[in-house]
Image: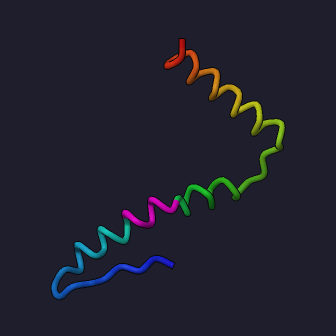
């Protein structure tokens, strides 16, 4: 559970802080990922392709 302290008259700031904390927990990303099933082989292939891209872009 996210807890944000609200000081007098600073609802906007507290809401902004709450949204930032919520984004950092990656809750929505996890929900979207779980919405549909992906086979383990597809996930592995995706990870391998991602690693190859990173290696090509940044590695030597």
Q: Nearer the viewer, residue 56 or 35?
A: 56
Which quadrant of the figure contains the C terminus? top right
Query: Which residue occupies the extreme bottom position in the image?
Result: 8
* Colour convention of the picture: rainbow
Say left or right for 18 vs 7: right
Q: Is residue 24 magenta?
A: yes
- Numbered circles on residues, count: 0
Say left or right for 44 vs 4: right
Instruction: Give above or below for 24 relative to 42.
Output: below
- Provide residue 26's location: percent of width, then percent of height: 53, 58
Q: Is residue 57 magenta?
A: no
Residue at 67% from the left image edge and 25% from the top image edge: 49
- Provide residue 21's location: percent of width, then percent of height: 41, 66
- Provide residue 18's location: percent of width, then percent of height: 37, 71
Q: What kind of secondary structure does the magenta stretch mostly adopt?
A: helix
Instruction: Give above or below for 55 relative to 39.
Output: above
Say left or right for 28 vs 6: right
Residue at 62% from the left image edge and 58% from the top image edge: 30
Instruction: Give above or below for 47 relative to 31.
Output: above
Segment tinted magenta in the rendering: 20-25
Residue at 79% from the left image edge and 36% from the top image edge: 42
Quarter-of-image position of residue 22: bottom left
Quarter-of-image position of residue 6: bottom left
Query: Which residue occupies the extreme left position in the image?
Result: 9
Query: Which residue occupies the extreme front position in the image?
Result: 60
Residue at 70% from the left image edge and 33% from the top image edge: 46
Instruction: Give above or below for 2 relative to 22.
Output: below
């Amino acid at each position: 559970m996210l807890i944000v302290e609200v000081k007098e008259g600073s609802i906007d700031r507290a809401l902004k802080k709450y949204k930032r904390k919520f984004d950092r927990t990656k809750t929505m990303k996890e929900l979207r990922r779980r919405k549909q099933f992906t086979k383990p082989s597809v996930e592995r292939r995706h990870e391998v392709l991602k690693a190859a891209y990173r290696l090509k872009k940044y590695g030597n």
